Every structure is written in structure tokens, then in C-alpha cells.
Image (cartoon, rainbow, N blue to C red):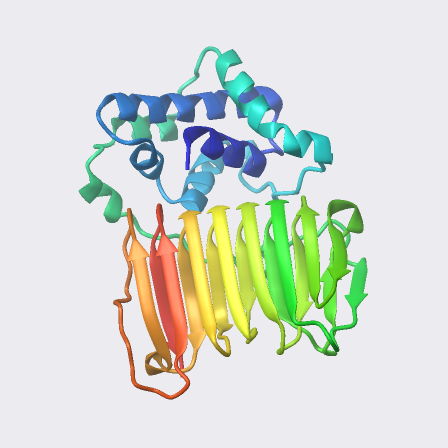
Amino acid sequence: MTRFDFEDWLRHRLSDLPREELDRIAAFYMDAIEARMEDGMTEEEAIYALGEPEALLEAIRADLPEYAHTTYQPVRRSKQSTASRGKWIVAGVAALAVIFALPVLLLVLNASPRYETITEEVLPPMVDEGYFEVSDPDAHTLFDATTLEKVTVAAALGSVQVEPSEDGNVQIVGDPVFYEAVRRGNTLYIENVEADFIVKIPYHVKLEIKCDVGNVVLYEIVPQTLSVYCDLGSIELHNVSAVHSITLEADCGSIEGSLQGPETDYEIDVEVDLGQTNLSDSYHSGDEEIKFTATADLGNVNITFEE
């Protein structure tokens, strides 16, 4: 996780703001990160010191009353612009000029850089179902899942919500302009995702999600195996489980929510670098124990069990 990745995420999530306002906010946070690095922090520690990602966005919007209640909308990007955004970020950072300090942002610079103060932050509540507003909720793409074994999702920009399928097929809810879906053999690939969307899966498939910028929210699914990797975004679980294994990784974001069944049903392996967790590693002697692995670099891991 680099400060340039962080800036890309920040610009994407605040893309509804005027360009001048967005440039000013992005420049301020880049300066804040660099200042903390000059004080001896590593780059990742400096980014984490800014606060939990969703709470940070709320604080920024709260200081801009005219945009405080603006609903995040995905930005349509071409494949060419998505592929070249890394170069654009570096060039954009070099061009940023004078920083206008906002009151809430001053609190970030004045805060103590000690790790102890960071761990005392209160986590924001999880987003509700209304968070997802797909660009075209009436657009549906269906795939016959009779012989399907695996579904993989590669999201560049946009959040992913997964729900159980009602008819045994794989269903994608969202504007096809913002994603590509193709079946190769027994695997369905959903690629080049550039907006929030919903995918519904049947019980028998394996599910793998890789999300660059955006959250992943999972509702009451029980796939064969579940793997989720997030670079800039959180992973939320709502009464989720799997037949064999669950693997969750979040670079800059939290992992939180609920798993189906008692804790004794799971073999737990949890690792948190800069954050807190309510779980500890555990192994039980059950015959069909589910392996649960959670890793968070800049975020917390908080999981409850629904018996």
C-alpha cells in the first residue's frame, strides 16, 4: 500500500466533488502522509494514522456541508484510462500546488503519531443495504450454473455485493457497460468491473473476488470456498459461511461482520498488522471444520458468530 494508491482511492470515492475541491483535499492528505514519514513513520503507518477509510470519508464530507449528503456514484471510465491511472496519479501529485487547510484536516496533522492513539479510534457502523446503487438496477445478466464450478470477480473501481441465487443460476445486476462476463470451461469470469454491482451465486460454486478500489459486502452465502482480496476497501460479512474454507485479506480496510454457526465450527487463523481484532487463533477437533483465515494490514478484524 503506497500513498499514491491511497490518493487514487480518495479521488475515486470523492469523485462527485468539484475538481478544485478534490485537488485541494487530495493534496492536503498527501502532504499529511509525507509529513508523518518525515517524522519517522513508514509509509503504511502514515496512511493508517489518517484513520479508518470510511470514517475518514465521513469526516471530510462533514466538513463540506454542501456535499455532506451527496450519494456516492460510480465514475464511468474507459479501459484505457483505468489502465493508465497509475501514471496519471504520479503526474498529478507533482502538479498539485497550494494546500488550503480544512478544520477537520488540521486535526489529522496535529494528532499524535503514536500508535496507541490510533488503536483507540471507534469503528464506524457497517454500511447498510442502501449503500449499493447500481447504475442500471434493471439490467440483468444470467448464466446457467448447472455445470459451473467457480465464479471469479476482478473489480478495478467499484464495490461488489454478493447474495445467494434464488433460481440456482448466476445473476449479475448492473449495467453491462461497466463489466465484462465470459465463461471459460467451468469458470465464470467477471472482469474489468468499473462500477458498483451485485452478483447472485448458487450454493455449489467456489467464489473468488479481487477488488482494487471499493468494498466487498457478502450476504448469507455459503459457497464451497470463499476468497476475497481488497486493496483499498473493507470486507463485510452478513451471516456468511462456506463448505470448506474462507480466506479474507484487506490491505487498507477492515474485515467485520458475522459468520454462520458457532465459533467451534471454524479453524481460525487471524493476522492484524496495524489494527485490532476480537479473534484469536484456534483449532477444534470437529470432523468438518471450516478453515477461516483473515488478514488485515491497515484495519481491524471484528467477527461475531450467529448460532
Left or right relative to 128: residue 78: right
Percent x, y of residue 250 = 43, 51
Residue 21: percent from the left, percent from the top?
Answer: 55, 23
Residue at x-position 31% and y-position 32%? 46
Task: Name the residue: 56% across, 35% down.
Answer: 14
Residue 18's quadrant in the figure?
top right
In percent of the image, x 42 and y 40: which residue is there? 56
* Residue 165 % position (x, y): 68, 74
Point out residue 155 in the picture as x, y percentages from the top left corner: 62, 48
Above or below: residue 161 compared with residue 62: below
Q: Quadrant of residue 115?
A: top left
Residue drawn at point x = 49 percent, y = 36 percent: 61
In the current view of this chain or complex, which residue is farthest to the bottom? 287
Quadrant that contains the N terminus: top left
Q: Which of 121 and 157 lies nearest the eye of the viewer?
A: 157
Q: Is residue 121 above or below residue 222?
A: above
Classify residue 182 by image quadrant.
bottom right
Is 104 in front, or is 234?
234
Please state if 94 lies on the left or on the right of 289 as rendered: right
The residue furthest front is 185
Q: Quadrant of the C terminus?
A: bottom left
Numbered marks: total: 0
